[in-house]
């Protein structure tokens, strides 16, 4: 690892306790929740937008890449500093600045943990709707960068649907404010543009979000099936009845066994799959819809339909879902997860294709996903210590995402592109569309120092710092 000449100047500029540079410390920041690794030259911990601006200006003067980082729970390599440089970690900017229930909004710094905002809003009868499975650890700044979702996006939408405004530092160091306190502000939707831009256009330093009133009634159900096809068919049957649950999550039999053995949530060990369904709203409407959902499940050959009888039982069911990724550690030392999206009517054939890919690759693949909006989450188990295993897992993931595109879906629903899926962007978009995206990015960052090599593939003849494409066969460990 090199010791760049610019580092002493940066160290003199920042808070003496606001940076890390030793190799042992930097190792903690070379990875996220994915499979790639790269180490920054230094990690800095700013306390406010002015300090972020000064760091960005320094990076621009010295031509140094700069990468933002929240909690490091991302799954697409978005916070991996593949070209070294400066990592800006937002863990010190973790204050909830305002809870405003009368206007149904809150103002937070980017390092606020997702769940902490809902806990803070709870006494006022409100919550923050986007709920990634990592919500106990992930930060709202990272959620904004990746446009994160979660189990309840079916009814509430993803992060961009709940962000009213941003304070952000641009690549020239200027501090700008976008959006307004109301849903539809005049001018271009810069808030929407920056949300999901994966740190390639700006570093967000303050976020105004929408709070949602807690529903009067919540009911949670577990429908148990002997075939995954019947599980998948039920999703379309429920929506055909003009019912939009707050969440419809599916776990297949492979994942069920791993989760139940770790969490003891009450999932059946002998089923091919289950649907975890949640309804919210006015009590009378929820009761009426609950019967419709029960009928839809039984019509699609659910062998059992359970209703959570208490809040404790409901929380236990969700504990199983939210802790599923962690449960895999009891079975496999590594896993590789994707988040391709398919139309609801294509869930069953997609699961069959994933099963075929598992058989041909010799790898175990379990499925847990947001069935209501077709956001698939195949978890590919492998052992990076075994030569060739990572490459097989990457190829299996590549084949799954190609199939998602083939059936009219997308290569990501909430994890972002990062460096993981960048090689598939030209399968998803035309050259003209990608060129348009590059031009928009270059308006913000003509030097391409903000999170280089992420989100957009390098175009022909472009001056961007280039990376080898992430293709099956490139090991990351």
Image: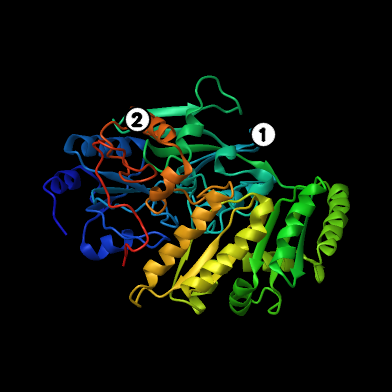
Q: Nearer the viewer, residue 415 or 355?
A: 355
Residue at (64% x, 32% y) in the render: 103
Q: Which residue is mark 2?
A: 444
Q: Give percent across and percent down for residue 442.
A: 33, 31
Instruction: Tell me if mark 2 has few (under 14), some (14-19) or many (20+) residues whose alpha carbon lies within 10 angstroms of its own.
Output: some
Q: Which residue is mark 1?
A: 102
Residue 462 visible to an observer of this rendering: yes
How many marks overall? 2
Q: CA distance from mark 1 to mark 2?
A: 35 Å
Q: What is the secondary structure assignment of the residue under circle 2?
A: helix
Q: Nearer the viewer, residue 363 or 123?
A: 363
**Compared to 469, does 188 lie above or below?**
above
Q: What is the secondary structure assignment of the residue under circle 1?
A: helix
Q: Give percent across and percent down for residue 456.
A: 37, 42
The N terminus: image quadrant: bottom left
Label 1 with label 2: CB-CB less than 8 Å: no
Residue at (72% x, 70% y) in the render: 227
Residue at (30% x, 43% y) in the render: 452
Going by the picture, which residue comes out furthest to the top? 186
Q: Is residue 248 left or right of residue 339?
A: right
Mark toward the start of the polypeptide (1 vs 2): 1
Q: Splitting the image into 4 quarters, where does residue 447 fall? A: top left
**Compared to 332, does 180 lie above or below?**
above
Q: Is residue 271 left or right of residue 299?
A: left
Nearer the observer, disc 1 or disc 2? 2
Q: Is residue 277 left or right of residue 366?
A: right
Q: Give percent across and percent down for residue 134.
A: 52, 58
């Amino acid at each position: 690892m090199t010791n760049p000449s610019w580092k002493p100047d940066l160290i003199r500029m920042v808070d003496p306790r606001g940076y890390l540079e030793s190799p042992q410390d930097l190792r903690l920041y070379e990875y996220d929740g994915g499979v790639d690794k790269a180490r920054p030259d230094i990690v800095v911990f700013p306390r406010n937008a002015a300090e972020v601006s000064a760091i960005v200006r320094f990076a621009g003067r010295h031509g140094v890449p700069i990468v933002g980082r929240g909690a490091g729970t991302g799954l697409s390599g978005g916070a991996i500093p593949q070209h070294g440089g400066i990592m800006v970690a937002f863990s010190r900017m973790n204050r909830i600045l305002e809870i405003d229930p009368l206007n149904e909004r809150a103002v937070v710094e980017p390092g606020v943990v997702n769940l902490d905002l809902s806990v803070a809003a709870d006494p006022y009868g409100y919550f923050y709707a986007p709920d990634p499975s990592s919500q106990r650890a992930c930060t709202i700044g990272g959620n904004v960068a990746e446009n994160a979702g979660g189990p309840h996006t079916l009814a509430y939408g993803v992060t961009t649907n709940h962000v009213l405004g941003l304070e952000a530092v641009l690549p020239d160091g200027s501090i700008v404010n976008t959006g307004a306190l109301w849903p539809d502000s005049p001018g271009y939707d810069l808030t929407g543009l920056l949300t999901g831009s994966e740190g390639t256009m700006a570093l967000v330093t303050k976020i105004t979000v929408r709070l949602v009133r807690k529903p009067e009634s919540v009911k949670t159900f577990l429908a148990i099936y002997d075939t995954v096809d019947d599980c998948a068919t039920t999703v379309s049957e429920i929506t055909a009845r003009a019912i939009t649950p707050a969440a419809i999550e599916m776990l297949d039999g492979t994942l069920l066994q791993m989760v139940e053995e770790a969490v003891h949530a009450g999932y059946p060990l002998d089923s091919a799959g289950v649907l975890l369904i949640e309804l919210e709203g006015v009590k009378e409407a929820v009761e009426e819809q609950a019967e419709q959902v029960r009928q839809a499940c039984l019509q699609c050959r659910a062998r059992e339909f359970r209703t959570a009888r208490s809040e404790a039982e409901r929380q236990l069911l969700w504990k199983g879902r939210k802790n599923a990724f962690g449960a895999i550690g009891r079975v496999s030392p590594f896993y590789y997860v994707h988040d391709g999206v398919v139309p609801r009517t294509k869930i069953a054939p997609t699961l069959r294709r994933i099963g075929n890919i598992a058989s041909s690759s010799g790898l175990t693949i379990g499925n847990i996903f947001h069935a209501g909006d077709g956001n698939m989450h195949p978890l590919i188990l492998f052992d990076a210590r075994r030569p060739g295993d990572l490459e097989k897992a990457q190829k299996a993931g590549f084949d799954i995402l190609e199939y998602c595109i083939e059936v009219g879906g997308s290569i990501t629903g909430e994890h972002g592109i990062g460096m993981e899926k960048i090689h598939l962007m030209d399968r998803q978009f035309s050259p003209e569309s990608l060129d348009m995206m590059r031009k928009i990015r270059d308006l913000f960052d003509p030097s391409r120092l903000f999170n280089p090599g992420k989100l957009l593939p390098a175009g022909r003849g472009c001056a961007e710092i280039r990376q080898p494409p992430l293709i099956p066969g490139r090991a990351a460990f």
